[in-house]
Image (tube, rainbow, N blue to C red):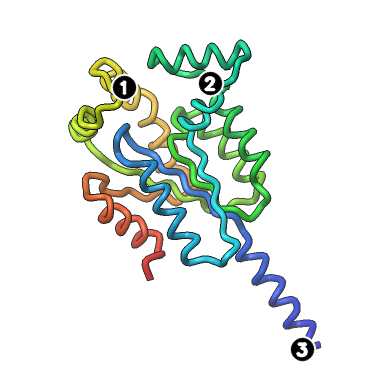
């Protein structure tokens, strides 16, 4: 009977540690979402077991990779990206959905960077995370002001960071992404954490780890 109890306890412990974790990093353009996603994944695997693996689900990277193809849709997406206009949410959702289906085995952490942005995308992601049994996904809002973001983008000297493109992205954040942030704030399924993004990279990371209880 004692051996049976020990076996059951071990099974429960194993099952619990294998529950996948999901993190959604959201914020204005230039707030450092990609950098903090990389640092978080590195820390999760440093403190976890040797088989630790995280999936970095980044909409920009998925779109750029997709646009390299030669079919009609891929060429259209390339044109959209080059013009700096918005990609249809149906395309973005299909890309991260297919990526998860192809790569998620049930044990990896999932770190979403730059997606979802629009409210409807967030609601569709709800369904996916619940389907996979993810408990209490974490939303990390890297909170920076519009002025801070604009100055940061202007200083990056990237080809797509023209004055017009920056203004368009920041305006779109106000009209669309803020709705998604409010949705996460008021949704009990998520653990919403506000982070001061106007700090040096290491300080932002330390605040994230402290609020997640991972800096011990």
Q: Which residue is mark 3?
A: 2
> Who is closer to the viewer here, 183 or 129?
129
Looking at the rendered image, the quarter that the N terminus falls into is bottom right
Q: Is residue 210 above or below residue 144?
A: below
Q: In terms of secondary structure, where does tag 1 sit? A: loop
Q: Is residue 89 above or below residue 96?
A: above
Distance from disc 2 to disc 3, alpha carbons, whole Å, reads: 59 Å
Q: Quadrant of residue 53?
A: bottom right
Farthest-out residue, bottom? 2
Distance from disc 1 to disc 2, alpha carbons, whole Å, reads: 17 Å
- Give the residue drawn at x 35%, y 55%: 208
- Give the residue drawn at x 47%, y 64%: 46
Q: Which residue is mark 2?
A: 67
Visible residue check, residue 135: no
- Percent across and percent down for residue 143 are 28, 42
Q: In terms of secondary structure, where does tag 2 sit? A: loop
The reply, left or right, for residue 46 in relation to residue 173 is right
Q: Quadrant of residue 163?
A: top left
The reply, left or right, for residue 69 in relation to residue 56 is right
Q: Earlier in the sequence, mark 1 or mark 2?
A: 2
Q: Which residue is mark 1?
A: 159
């Amino acid at each position: 009977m004692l051996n049976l109890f020990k076996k059951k306890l071990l099974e429960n412990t194993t099952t619990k540690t294998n529950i996948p974790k999901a993190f959604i990093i959201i914020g204005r353009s230039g707030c450092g979402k990609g950098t903090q996603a990389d640092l978080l994944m590195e820390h999760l695997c440093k403190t976890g077991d040797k088989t630790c693996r995280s999936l970095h689900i980044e909409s920009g990277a998925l779109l750029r990779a997709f646009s390299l193809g030669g079919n009609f849709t891929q060429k259209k997406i390339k044109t959209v990206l080059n013009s700096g206009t918005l990609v249809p949410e149906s395309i973005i959702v299909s890309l991260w959905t297919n990526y998860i289906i192809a790569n998620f085995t049930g044990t990896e952490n999932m770190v979403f960077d730059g997606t979802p942005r629009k409210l409807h995308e967030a609601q569709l992601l709800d369904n996916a995370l619940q389907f996979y049994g993810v408990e209490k996904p974490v939303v990390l809002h890297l909170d920076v002001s519009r002025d801070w973001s604009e100055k940061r983008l202007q200083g990056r000297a990237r080809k797509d960071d023209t004055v017009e493109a920056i203004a368009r992205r920041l305006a779109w954040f106000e009209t669309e992404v803020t709705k998604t942030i409010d949705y996460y704030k008021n949704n009990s399924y998520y653990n919403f954490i506000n982070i001061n993004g106007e700090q040096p990279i290491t300080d932002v990371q330390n605040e994230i780890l402290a609020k997640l209880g991972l800096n011990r």
